[in-house]
Amino acid sequence: MDKMRSLIFFMVMSSFDTLEIKDNLTATEGGSITLPAPVVKLGFLLYGGEVLAQLKNKDIDFYEKSFRNRLLWNSSTGLLTLTDLQKNDSGIYGIQSKKGNVFTVSYKLSVYECVHQPSVKASAVSADSCTLVCLVEKGDETTLLWYRGEERVNQSSSDLSLSLTLHKQDFSSIFKCVAANPAEEKSVSINAAVLCGQNNTEEKGYDHGRVGLILISALSILTIASFITWMFVMKKCRKGDSQSQGR
C-alpha cells in the first residue's frame, strides 16, 4: 500500500513542478472555501507538496487524516470545499483531474482572522464642528475606512483608530466606518447629527419653547381666574350695598 501511494505521489507531483498559480483565494478562520476547479470522475487534491486525497467513484480516499472531517466533495458538481479553516491552512492547493475534463491547476489560499466589529465615538464637539473616531481591535491586515454615503473620504492601512473631522454642513450626512481585511469587512453607520449632538440641541430648544408656552398658558388662566374672582366680589359688594339702602 505504501509503495502504491508513493507511486501515486510521484506521478501526481511531477505534473505540479512548474505549474503556475491560477488564482489567489481568501477566507476567514472558522469559515470555508470552495475550490473553483471541478473533479467530476477521478482526481487528486494536494497541499504543500503532499497528496491530501484521491477522488474516485463519488468517494474520497484520504491520505491526510487531519482533513478527513473538513474536506467535502460534491460528486454532482465536482467541487471541493474545505471547512473549519484555520490560519495554518494557508498555502498552495493543487487539483488534478484525470478523467473526463483532464486538467492540472493550483490555487494560493490565504486564511485571515475574522474582522472585529468597529465602533465610533465623538470628540471635540462644538456647534460648528465635530470629530468622529472609529476604533477596531487589532487583526490581520485590518484597514479602516470612512465613507460619506458611497464616497470614500479617509483611509488608514495600519492604525487601530481613524479620525474624521466634520463641519456644520456635514452634520446632515450619513457616514459609515468600515473595518476590512482581504477576506471580509464589517461596518457601522453613523448619523452625524445624532452623534455630534445636533438632535440634542434641537430637542433642548423645543423643550424651552414648550416651557414658555406652558408658562403663558398658566398666566392666562391665572389672569382669567383673578378677573372672575374680582367680578364675583364686586357683584357681592353691590348686592350688600343695595340691601343696606333698602333698610
Image (cartoon, grey):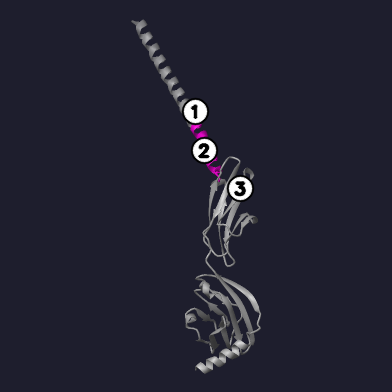
Residue 216: x, y in percent? 49, 28
Q: Nearer the viewer, residue 34 or 139?
A: 139
As displayed, is residue 103 above or below residue 4?
above
Q: Nearer the viewer, mark 1 or mark 3?
A: 3
Q: Which residue is mark 3?
A: 165
Q: Nearer the viewer, mark 1 or mark 2?
A: 2
* Label 1: how many Cα within 10 Å (few below 14, some 14–19, many 20+): few
In which quadrant of the rendered view does residue 78 lie?
bottom right
Describe residue 107's horizontal placement relative to residue 29 as left or right: right
Q: Which residue is mark 2?
A: 204
Q: Earlier in the sequence, mark 1 or mark 2?
A: 2
Q: Which residue is mark 1?
A: 216
Q: Which residues are magenta?
A: 196-213
Q: Is residue 205 magenta?
A: yes
Please give the name of the residue rendered at 57% of the width and 57% of the height, measured from the top-left corner: 159
Describe residue 60's horizontal placement relative to residue 168 as left or right: left
Q: Nearer the viewer, residue 85 or 228?
A: 85
Q: Is residue 85 magenta?
A: no
